[in-house]
Image (cartoon, rainbow, N blue to C red):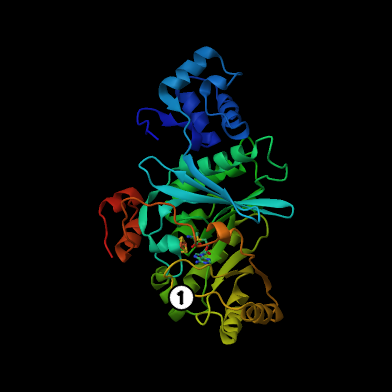
Amino acid sequence: MTIDTQRVNLMGMTLAQLEQFFLEMGEKKYRAAQVVKWIHQRGVSDIDAMSDISKVLRDKIKLVATIMAPEVTYSNTSKDGTVKWIMTMPGGSSVETVYIPEEGRGTLCVSSQIGCALDCSFCSTGKQGFNRDLSAAEIIGQVWLAAKYFDKPDQKRERRITNVVMMGMGEPLLNFDNVIPAMNLMMEDNAYGISKRRVTLSTSGVVPQIDKMVGVTDVCLALSLHAPDDALRNQLVPLNKRYNIQMVMDACNRYMASLSDIRVVTVEYTLMNGINDAAHQAVALAELLKQLPCKINLIPFNPFPNSGYERPSNNRMHTFREILQKAGHNVTIRKTRGDDIDAACGQLVGRVADITRRSEKFIQAVELGNSAADIAKTRIKR
Ligand code: SAH
Ligand code: SF4
């Protein structure tokens, strides 16, 4: 794919940004809703196909703007119906997007970065390092392409995207300025119109960025916890050395309190055999989570080459769940989907050219407000 550096990409622009775009062109604001509908509801990327916009105005738009999505370079459907796409970005790196059909709903798992800088010990995305942030267009472009894929006569009607989770590659809160507009488009009535209760941002716990969400967005929040104490979480999620469990839970409570309706945090806990799945750890987790209104989603570890971890037996996972349930928690064990096509959580790797590894320096730089692109240029090594 070639990059058009001269013209703006309308794909990633929110309704408000497009309104501004048209006002600056000396045009009427309502053009923005028309264009958003063409792009996101009708899947159109050809400005000339926008038949309720005059030829004169279309030509004027084409001089300064384009509509570009990532390119699908691979797709595969699992025997359980899960679909995985590899989407290639300008520059040759690629990310993975996964669709998971379930009874009565269809969830799209979207990536926010190419790779991830945070290096969680059990995550294949983390193991491959960080390349760059995705733009808002590249994030919403994944939804656009998946929606288009299902909008074909041979696809069954139930193949609809009812939910979106930012649980693909990357840490969404370290790409805040692109993730938030893309999530706005997911919820925008003129675009995908998905309810705020069905759009979820998953984070490993970047505390200042959780606080930044307050008043800016009202999407659902998922927290990747994975351990009941700091000593273990420091090993599994290195970011915990900077923001410990208490700091992260306090930030989650502040965000939930900012919402106008009552919702709970989804706590994700990847179960790894002999690491974080013992009965005493379930007891400690049950106690810890008394202070965070939540539902707990236990994720059986998904293996990848040389991970060094194993999935626990079903017996161990059920015992773990029962202890939490007896303590009064709402707990589910996530069904593993799409593992025959390497589409399960933590198995997403894409193809990352020009890797920049994670480091403490990276996280510090983000806090100082440097863009991830600038930081990537410094090519921090392990
Ligand atoms: N960076 C964000 C979102 C992407 S990861 C986050 O960490 O929350 C999405 C989820 O998959 C997280 O809960 C993550 O901990 C989990 N995950 C990562 N690797 C996994 C693996 N190998 N098996 C099971 N779950 C995994
Ligand atoms: Fe990054 Fe999330 Fe993987 Fe950790 S689990 S390395 S934060 S993508």
Q: Position of residue 19 (x, y in %)?
A: 52, 29
- From what the image shows, is residue 146 above or below residue 60? below
- From what the image shows, is residue 60 above or below residue 164? above
- From what the image shows, is residue 290 above or below residue 381? below
- Any part of residue 110 in sight: no
**Local secondary structure at mark 1:** helix
Query: How many numbered markers are drawn?
Result: 1
Residue at x 51%, y 40% (from the top left corner): 141
Nearer to me, 289 or 151 = 151
Ligand 2 position by quadrant: bottom left
* Residue found at the far bottom of this picture: 280
Q: Quadrant of the N terminus?
A: top left
Q: Position of residue 328 (x, y in %)?
A: 70, 77
Q: Position of residue 6 (x, y in %)?
A: 35, 28
Quarter occupied by residue 193 = top right
* Residue found at the far top of this picture: 56
Residue at x 54%, y 65% (from the top left corner): 223
Q: Quadrant of the C terminus?
A: bottom left
Nearer to me, 295 or 162 = 162
Pointer 1 residue: 233
Q: Give the residue type at disc 1.
A: Arg
Q: What crowding class fits label 1: few (fewer than 14 Cα within 10 Å), some (14-19), or many (20 or more)?
A: many
Nearer to me, 118 or 72 = 72
